[in-house]
Amino acid sequence: MNCRDAIPLMHEYLDGDLPGTEAAKLKEHMLACRDCRAMFEQFEKTEALVRSLTPAPVPDDLTPKIMSGIPKPRRRSGWLRWVRRHPAVSVAAVFVAVMLVSFASLWNQDAELAVKGADLDQVQIHGHTVIVPQGRTVHGNLVVENGEVRVDGEVTGNLTVIDGTVNMASTAHIAGQIKQVDQALDYVWYKLNEWAGLIAR
């Protein structure tokens, strides 16, 4: 046995883990090798010193101190938990928000006159002015975007004016409601209702 092999065996011997045959070979080597014998004596002294030390008493408040030093897990906000529990509603809300933004972005981008209705042969268009002449009747709804509406005759449905004005003569008669959409939020609401009406058909 050489010195390099003897040193790890010394630790095992001191721990009581070295088998009898190995322990006998180690003792035989230490009788012949003065350096290994001196090293073994140092190991014995160190081992005796470590065993003589008594462990320091653990304070009673050590566990609470350690636990208070551990950072508390962050609580998730209530809306985030709600989103995780209701994914379909969350997706629908995001869809509606995207639609609102897209409708709002369309507001005031198109300044071209647009006229919609079922009975448009009863109206006259001069520039950006849509006229329902006296003695004429528009059956159904009439929608005018980006223009002025002058009603001298009759409209049997609703009159909707988007980003424009309405002028009514004393002879005018509108059976339905007059809706003026002149703000982005009103426009978005109008488009959503129009879109919902198309889906419902």
Image: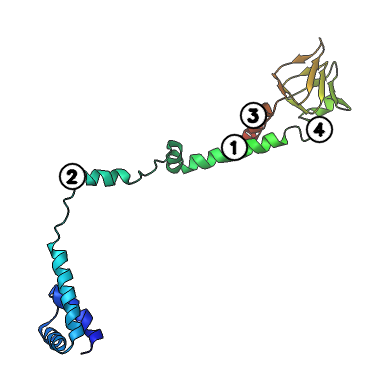
Q: Amino acid at mark 1?
A: Ala
Query: SS at mark 1?
Result: helix
Q: Earlier in the sequence, mark 3 or mark 2?
A: 2
Q: Earlier in the sequence, mark 1 or mark 2?
A: 2
Q: Which mark is residue 186?
A: none
Q: Judge depth for marks 3 and 1 and give the one in front.
A: 1
Image quadrant in which you'd find residue 152: top right
Find disc 2 in the rendering and name its residue.
60
Q: Residue at x 47, y 43 (%)?
A: 87
Query: SS at mark 2?
Result: loop
Point out the residue furthest to the right here. 126
- Point out the image quarter for the N terminus: bottom left
Q: Nearer the viewer, residue 145 or 143?
A: 145
- Point out the image quarter for the C terminus: top right
Tags 3 and 1 touching, CB below 8 Å: no
Find disc 1 in the rendering and name its residue.
97
**Residue 112, percent across and down?**
82, 33
Mark-to-mark CA distance, 3 and 4: 19 Å
Mark-to-mark CA distance, 3 and 1: 12 Å
Find disc 4 in the rendering and name its residue.
111
